[in-house]
Image: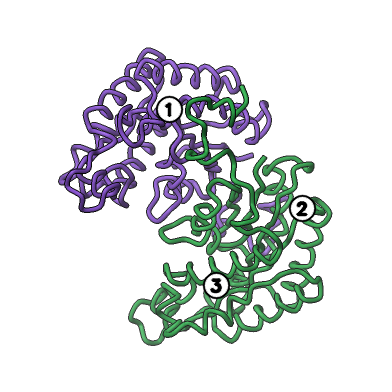
Chain colours: A green, B purple
């Protein structure tokens, strides 16, 4: 039975198997070692995530088969400004933090041995958002700001530290990349291939810290050059 | 419970979640609709595939949870020339066909409702193989030929027709692509992004023929713009 890695989150998770996507890169890295299970729900905030949590996780195999790890990557939608176009996705910061605690509690109860990893929301390029939503209309307003995203990222990190679980500070890490607004973000919010690569590397590092590295995970079945081709039963049994 | 699509094959399956890979593209297309499970074993022929079949498929969920479909994509290694460098991977054509029948029989017994799809091996660019294995040594010999690959492809198609199951004729389809030797193959055998795209589109067509299309599969959870944000319990229950 291969270990499972579950990716639970919003659109940045749902589209993570697209070209250069961080989810596909994980599946590729662990191609013979672990199954990467995609549970991304575009546009969802933590309030809605909590409501689907049990339904969506029950489909992933029995309670006896605990995944090795699950990433929880919400906040980009919660941090939408309440009085703008995407206000219906907004969740107040305190509720966001409480929802993250509830999601963590759910996993600890359902799968006690599973490592829960929080991923904080990414930074926002407001100009990119305006262009995406309003085209060239200069009167347009961004429905998300980098400042609000930063507050939710800090909230996510605070909750993770308190729970003593790993957390990836996407918001800070991506702003270290040269020209991050355009180089890592495609529309001010979603990732370019470089943005995907940055997150992929952070997830790989975090998994390694909890013992889930390419080196430590067991390869499913012998490599072809290890097979005794004159007597393959030596490798495979009968 | 989402439908499962299992990809069983050799290196062209194992690496199908790499950049532009046909497996990742399937996972992306079905991101909210189906789970794509990767079971690729680089270098394996059908003889070894048969030996690991039960072990590798048992890990995919109980017998009660039958995948919607499984692709069986072997033959590139079976078709290695017996008297060349990769001869240890060679399997005689008659045994190859018999092994394919046995793999099909295994699936029909284990998962009677699962659609088994055969994928015939791709064409070979001998010049690309020599370059990959021998560098610029002009005396080098290819360990695979397009002619041999074609015979195994025909064998695969014959078995599939007899079993009355869908089959993708990769060998013929890829040779219809302009400059196929270099445009679809990276080293005379493995796929470029274009080669991946060609196979991806064939798999999508084949899945559609058996009722597994993006349009027909059910989306897991409502789209975010369908959520009644003032009363999400209308969508999600309590």
* Rendered location of residue B163, percent (x, y): 41, 14
Q: Residue at x 58, y 17 (%)?
A: B109
Nearer the observer, B50 or B175 = B50
- Looking at the picture, does residue B116 appear above or below residue A107? above
Q: Residue at x 40, y 79 (%)?
A: A182
Same chain, marks 2 and 3? Answer: no
Badge 2 marks a residue whose secondary structure is loop
Which chain is home to disc 3?
A
Q: Residue furthest top?
A: B162
* Rendered location of residue A190, percent (x, y): 48, 69
Q: Residue at x 54, y 69 (%)?
A: A199
Q: Are marks 1 and 3 in contact (CB under 8 Å)?
A: no
Q: Nearer the viewer, mark 2 or mark 1?
A: 1
Q: Quadrant of residue A98?
A: bottom right
Nearer the observer, B150 or B117 = B150
The residue pinned by badge 1 equals B117
Nearer the observer, B81 or B99 = B81
* Rendered location of residue B75, percent (x, y): 37, 29
Is B47 positioned to the left or the right of A237 in the image?
left
Choose the circle earlier in sequence order: 2 or 1.
1
Q: Quadrant of residue A205?
A: bottom right
Same chain, marks 2 and 1? Answer: yes
Indicate which disc residue B238 carries.
2
Q: Are marks 2 and 3 in contact (CB under 8 Å)?
A: no
Marks 1/3: CA–CA distance: 43 Å
Badge 1 marks a residue whose secondary structure is strand
The residue pinned by badge 3 equals A86
Which chain is home to disc 1?
B
Is A17 positioned to the left or the right of B130 in the image?
right
- Looking at the picture, does residue A74 appear above or below residue B124? below
């Amino acid at each position: 039975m291969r270990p499972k890695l579950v990716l639970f989150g919003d659109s940045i998770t749902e589209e993570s198997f697209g070209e250069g996507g961080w989810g596909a890169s994980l599946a590729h890295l662990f191609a013979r070692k672990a199954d990467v299970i995609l549970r991304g729900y575009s546009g969802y905030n933590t309030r809605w995530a909590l409501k689907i949590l049990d339904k969506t996780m029950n489909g992933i195999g029995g309670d006896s088969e605990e995944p090795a790890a699950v990433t929880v990557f919400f906040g980009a939608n919660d941090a939408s400004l309440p009085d703008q176009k995407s206000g219906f996705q907004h969740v107040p910061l305190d509720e966001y933090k409480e929802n993250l605690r509830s999601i963590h509690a759910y996993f600890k109860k359902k799968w006690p041995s599973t490592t829960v990893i929080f991923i904080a929301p990414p930074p926002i390029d407001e100009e990119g958002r305006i262009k995406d939503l309003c085209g060239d209309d200069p009167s347009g307003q961004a429905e998300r700001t980098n400042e609000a995203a930063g507050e939710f990222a800090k909230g996510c990190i605070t909750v993770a530290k308190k729970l003593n679980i790993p957390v990836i500070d996407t918001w800070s890490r991506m702003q270290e990349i040269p020209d991050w607004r355009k180089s890592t973000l495609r529309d001010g919010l979603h990732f370019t291939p470089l943005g995907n690569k940055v997150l992929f590397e952070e997830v790989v590092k975090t998994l390694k810290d909890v013992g889930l590295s390419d080196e430590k995970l067991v390869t499913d079945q012998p490599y072809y050059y290890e097979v005794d081709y004159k007597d393959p039963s030596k490798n495979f049994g009968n």
